[in-house]
Image (cartoon, rainbow, N blue to C red):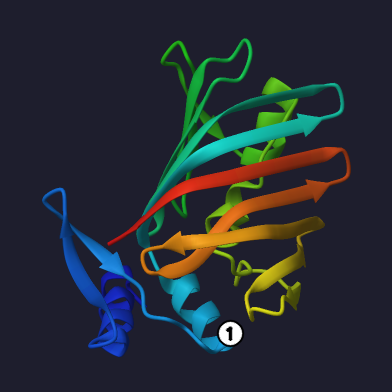
Amino acid sequence: MAVSQRRANLRACLIPMLLLTACAGNQSLFLPDFRDWEIRKKVLQEMDEWEFSGRIGVSAGTEGFNGKFWWRQDGTVFRARISGPLGVGTIFINGNKRELTLTDRDGEVIELEDAEVDLRERYGWTIPVSSLRYWALGVPDPNSPSSEELGANGLLSALTQREWGVTIAEYRDGGGQPMPRRLTAVDDDIKVRLVIDSWAFR
């Protein structure tokens, strides 16, 4: 199904549950209160216009850093900015279903065959690029098997997927709905800690 058709179907299902409010001249989408986990999971997995900003900490063996992190999802296209890694500066990772590119601090654009492997080889650390767009929303990646654990609040608290162990320690309001605030993803010696300060849905 085309992205535009999928988006139309999703919004048709949510109206009139969704409330739109103007924010700084743009339309900011307020999500309904999803009481059922399966409904919440399906809707958030299909959300494809949103962004968040926050902080990231990564450790991998003897390598690691703390910095600022921003992610924007527009359909199948995403843009991510990581600022602050020691000796790296600000890097950008852009991708869609066909290609992934990294733009380093010098402006050089590099095509990535496998973002997670290529980042590790280039910088000594990596992040779960292909699934992070889903995990950050507090849902599993629909493209691979997973084991989910819900907390007493009915929200995702732990997840095992693609050999990564993910825990969500805190939720906070984002677009009128509880959204992950503190998330940790671990795979062998790699540990990614994410603190999300703000959400915007469109």
Q: Quadrant of residue 87?
A: top right
Q: Residue 27, can we see it? A: yes
Total labels: the figure holds 1
- Where residue 92 sits: x, y (%)? 46, 30
Tell me if residue 109 comes above or below residue 39 in the rendering: above
Residue lying at 73% horizontally and 29% vertically, measured from the top left: 125
Residue lying at 61% horizontally and 20% vertically, measured from the top left: 85
- What residue sits right under mark 1 in the picture? 37
Residue lying at 20% horizontally and 71% vertically, measured from the top left: 20
Q: Residue 103, can we see it? A: no
Q: In front here: 45 or 111?
A: 45
- Give the side of residue 37 with respect to residue 3, left or right: right
Tell me if residue 30 comes above or below residue 74 in the rendering: below
Mark 1, other Cα within 10 Å: few <14 / some 14–19 / many ≥20? some
Residue lying at 61% horizontally and 66% vertically, measured from the top left: 141
- Give the side of residue 158 with respect to residue 128, left or right: right
- Give the side of residue 15 with respect to residue 135, left or right: left
- Where residue 198 sits: x, y (%)? 42, 49
Quadrant location, the N terminus: bottom left
- Where residue 200 sits: x, y (%)? 34, 55
- Where residue 105 sits: x, y (%)? 47, 14
Q: Quadrant of residue 3?
A: bottom left
Q: Element under label 1? A: helix
